[in-house]
Amino acid sequence: MHNKPIYLFSVSSHPDAVHVNSLDITFFQPEIDFSKYDYFIITSKQASKALQQYEKKEYIKKPALCISKQSAKSFEDLGGQVLAVGKGYGDTLVEKIKQYPKETKWLYLRAEFVASDFVFTCKEEGYCIDEKIVYASKCSEELLHVTVPQEAILIFTSPSSVECFLSRHTLLHTHKIIVIGKTTAKALPKNCFYTLSDETTIESCMQIAYSLK
């Protein structure tokens, strides 16, 4: 363990960090006719978990455009095929979608609230994307009641993990803040100093945390 405690605000844990589950997830099961679509768009591993509520044979042959390595792995773990992988941000999926004909039928399996407007951008240009809300998240009780030391290193892995933290806690100048991506960074207060991870992975964030004195 680092000489300063590392607090990881994430749904996923890491053995070298104090894990604070930042979100409680609720899954939905809307009616979906999978045969209408060519490809999925998946921007979190929660979307892959939501798919497990359906008959596997109905969806498993549909390749998925995934936002990151982790979301791609979650879909592959189901037995699915990954079409392509973005760079961790919704905006990077636009260029991927534009590589396919406008007639291509996409299904975006999404959260109730999303941080990126990439789907709107693509629809404005005539691309065919349907959206189904398959899960929702709310601030976890654990995050709301955690006590964070003044000298801690804080890792945030989603905009909602930042927003939930700030709903009950204050970021101090003594905290070292690491964020997993640019979208998460935007959720921080203005003029808040932070370090952006090289890759959108928890391991990349942890490598930075190890190096901080």
Image (cartoon, rainbow, N blue to C red):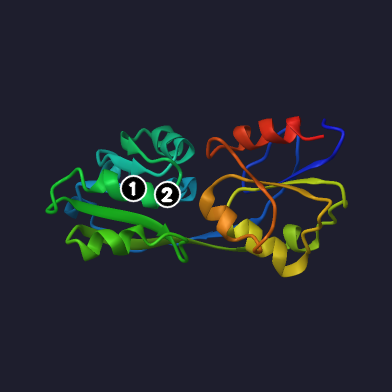
Q: Is 138 situated left or right of 34 in this image? A: right
For this rendering, which residue is in front, 196 or 58? 196
Tell me where residue 1 sits by quadrant.
top right
Q: Is residue 29 visible?
A: no
Tell me where residue 83 sits by quadrant.
top left
- For disc 2, the neighbor class at 10 Å (few under 14, some 14 to 19, many from 20) is many
Which numbered disc, 2 or 1, marks the residue that appears first in the sequence? 2
For this rendering, which residue is in front, 149 or 177? 177
- Label 1 secondary element: helix
The answer to the question of whether label 2 and label 1 lie on touching residues, with beta carbons closer than 8 A, is yes
Q: Is residue 190 above or below residue 38?
A: below
Q: Is residue 154 above or below residue 136?
A: above
Q: Position of residue 177 (x, y in %)?
A: 71, 48
Tell me where residue 13 sits by quadrant.
top right
Q: Position of residue 162 (x, y in %)?
A: 65, 58
- For disc 1, the neighbor class at 10 Å (few under 14, some 14 to 19, many from 20) is many
- Label 2 secondary element: loop
The residue pinned by badge 1 equals 93
Residue type at mark 2 is Thr
Q: Quadrant of the C terminus?
A: top right
Q: Is residue 191 visible?
A: yes
Residue type at mark 1 is Leu
Q: Is 164 situated left or right of 126 in this image? A: right
The residue pinned by badge 2 equals 43
